Image (tube, grey):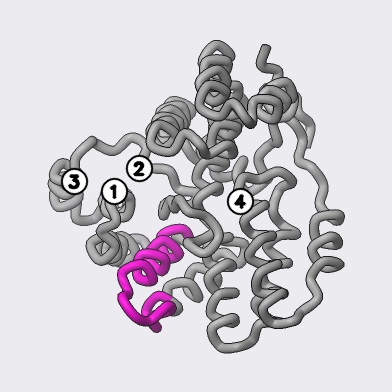
Amino acid sequence: MDKAGVSRGSSIFFVVAAISAASAIGYNVLGSRDPTAGDPAAAAAPASIEQLRALAEASPDNARAWQQLGFAHFERGEFAEAAKAYERAVSIDGGEAALWSALGEARVMASERDPMPPAALEAFRKASELDPRDPRARYFLGVQKDLEQDHEGAIASWVALLADTPPGAPWERDLVRTIEQVGKINGIEIETRIASAMGGRMAAPQIGAPGLPGPTQEQLAAAGSIPPGEQRKMAEGMVARLEQRLRDDPSNLDGWIMLMRSRMTLGEPEQAKAALDVAVRANPGAAARLRAEAATLGIR
């Protein structure tokens, strides 16, 4: 895609897509999870659960309101409540893959014994039918294969997901680790397959600043349906949430790098530099890596 033809709004949308994608793969891959996975409506949500519930109940036909409520419950670890809210969302709009895969993950997390409840599997399969590229559904359908002792099939699914993962994506390292662990436990050769999957990828075009990967065509298409002002508001909300997570866990180097990228894409180089300074103070042993990453982003 010609970089000159990419709109500023699409760059902002990349911030949202990138931050949510960093959390979209599933609980076995990433420690932090974001059940909105590609539909970042929760960024502009009111602060309290009570406000969110009131808005949802006042808008019984608004899937986004119920999605926001589900997201908030999930963030609080209230997985059963999150599942109920997502059930309402998909009953209103059953055509969104991200809603179905979010519902599936909430059902998995709400289960005390079954690692893949039938209702969760049903939701992931529905998401996959709607969008075969939904990363969260793809990951969990691979988990189901592993649970069924089809370890080869699980690894094949995850390797295919890795092949579609943008180079340097925040979840890339953890996805590779999952493949390596399952391969080692089950005596399956994976090094050549991982190398082939990663070597066959092409870096996306850069946008906004040196070192920033561009959005996929699917992300750009989605961005085109969202008003630019709302894109900006969503992006700023997602960045604020990321900053809060980093305050709680300042050792998350990938999170700091994502924050710096996001600030640069939003046209906020001073805030990006401030993030670098805080990250270095919190992680003096990783200062060289953080500064190197910042340099590729054009942070001085």
Closer-to-camera residue (194/89): 194
Q: Is residue 182 above or below residue 259?
A: below
Where disc 3 sits, the SS reads helix
Residue shown at 57%/61% (left/top)? 134
What's the CA distance linking mark 2 and mark 3?
Answer: 12 Å
Task: Give the residues drawn in magenta, as a range.
Answer: 98-120
Q: Quadrant of the N terminus?
A: top right
Residue 35's spot in the image, x, y percent?
Answer: 41, 55
The local crowd at label 4, few if under 14, some if 14 to 19, many if 20 or more residues have their Cα within 10 Å, is many
Residue shown at 52%/41% (left/top)? 19
Where disc 1 sits, the SS reads helix
What's the CA distance linking mark 3 and mark 1?
Answer: 7 Å
Amino acid bearing label 4: Trp
Tell me whether the residue at label 1 lies in contact with that at label 2, contact meaning CB atoms closer than 8 angstroms.
yes
Q: Is residue 85 above or below residue 247?
A: below
Q: Which residue is mark 3?
A: 49
| Magenta stretch: includes residue 101 | yes
Amino acid bearing label 3: Ile
Residue 42, numbered circle: 2
Numbered disc in front, either 1 or 4 = 4
First of labels 3, 1 by sequence position: 3
Residue 179's spot in the image, x, y percent?
Answer: 68, 67
Residue shown at 32%/50% (left/top)? 75
First of labels 1, 2 by sequence position: 2
Numbered disc in front, either 4 or 2 = 4
The local crowd at label 2, few if under 14, some if 14 to 19, many if 20 or more residues have their Cα within 10 Å, is many
Most common secondary structure along the magenta stretch = helix
